[in-house]
Amino acid sequence: MSEVVAGAVAERFEELYGGRPEGVWAAPGRVNLIGEHTDYNDGFVMPFALPHVTVAAVSRRTDGVLRLHSADIDGGVVELRVDELAPESDRNWTAYPAGVLWALREAGHPVTGADVHLTSTVPSGAGLSSSAALEVVVALALNDLYELGLKGWQLARLCQRAENVYVGAPTGIMDQTASACCEAGHALFLDTRDLSQKQIPFDLAAEGMRLLVVDTQVKHAHSDGEYGKRRAGCEKGAALLGVDALRDVPYDGLDAALDRLGDEEEVRRLVRHVVTEDERVERVVSLLESGDTRAIGPVLIEGHASLRDDFRISCPELDLVVDTALAAGALGARMTGGGFGGSAIVLAEAADVDTVTKAVQEAFASADFTAPRVFEAVPAAGARRIS
Ligand code: ADP
Ligand code: MG
């Protein structure tokens, strides 16, 4: 499969740029099993990689030119000069790959240009991190071609910098680390404070279960501004509590912390979500490690309630997925990703998958919502060279 893709992408590269690429790389999108809006609070997350990937054929250039082409975007090859790359100068898709090159050069790596052609099967804007897949595939290709010797977590940091500073999107470190570092058959338990990682075996099929991703295909307006507000509220909470980040509020000290916040009602809700969510990640890790996989279902349900009621970033479509799936017999369900649309995940017995899927589709039709895209997510490999 990946050989076919690599071959087709290399051929298209040759048509565009008139020579074979030096190599072809792939980087996946991700879903987050648990640990939402914890990554910018120095907390815990637990994503796994999707089989959906962004594939890039890349060659080096020595003349200071960066040429970019995406099969998924109308328009031809975009040509940029690497010494003219500047943060927030570009509002197009090209800001993601150009930002990676900029971040590498800013960090002192001698990257002198590249030709890039890419194509992706990661749904864009669905909360499944097509942006991180795009950044990471370019970073890995340049790392290999320019022999920079950077590790996955270092590439993730550079990609985050590209997205935060160059693109201008204030996102945490989870997405890029997931795309760079996940392993097939595992979820990645990541401490976003020091980026220490643990691969947790996560093979639902072997235990007769499935995990569905339900892409609601909606993205509600103002989601960027709302994300910024939540982030600012979390920072305010940490400041009021005198800690570096909400990660430092212990779970067993939560009630005392909430008391100290007095009548800061909104901040109290945000703090409660983040502190309980970190605890939920730790609980899921220990349940998976002790082989009690079905017991993560209720933890996912708690996580959704916390995002809906305390963090307040769900929406009618996401709530409908969760409520309908649970009513149809799912073991657990929750929204995943940034919120206000995007995707939900559903954990179900293999035997119940069809019933649950049908129930969700019918509920969306009855509510006059756009039909959701439903697919099964099997934990796949992180970024790699495929040719
Ligand atoms: P998400 O990461 O959840 O998919 P984002 O808004 O963070 O959503 O990133 C989506 C953006 O990333 C797109 O609008 C586009 O600019 C860029 N992008 C993602 N995949 C591709 C692709 N295959 N080709 C070109 N641009 C892409
Ligand atoms: Mg993104």
Image (cartoon, helix red, strand yellow):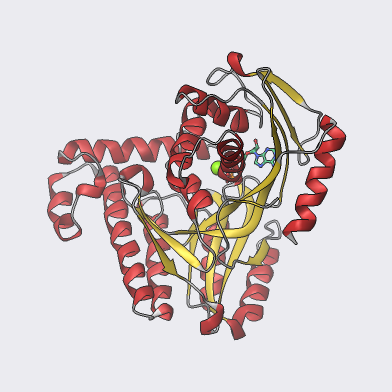
Decide: is 108 above or below 265.
above
Decide: is 84 above or below 260.
above
Q: Position of residue 254 (x, y in %)?
A: 18, 55
Residue at x 47%, y 37% (from the top left corner): 160
Q: Where is residue 297 in the image (x, y as percent from the top left)?
A: 43, 74
Q: Position of residue 155 (x, y in %)?
A: 48, 40
Residue with the most extreme front position: 147
Left or right for 60, reference 330: right
Decide: is 77 above or below 277.
above
Residue at x 59%, y 64% (from the top left corner): 213
| Residue 56 is at least partly visible in this image | no
What is the count of numbered marks? 0
Q: Position of residue 346 (x, y in %)?
A: 54, 69
Residue at x 61%, y 40% (from the top left corner): 141
Residue with the most extreme right position: 15
Q: Quadrant of ligand 2?
A: top right
Determine the image quadrant of residue 24. Answer: top right
Q: Which of 255 and 42 is in front in this view?
A: 42
| Residue 293 is at least partly visible in this image | yes
Q: Which of 215 and 56 is in front in this view?
A: 56
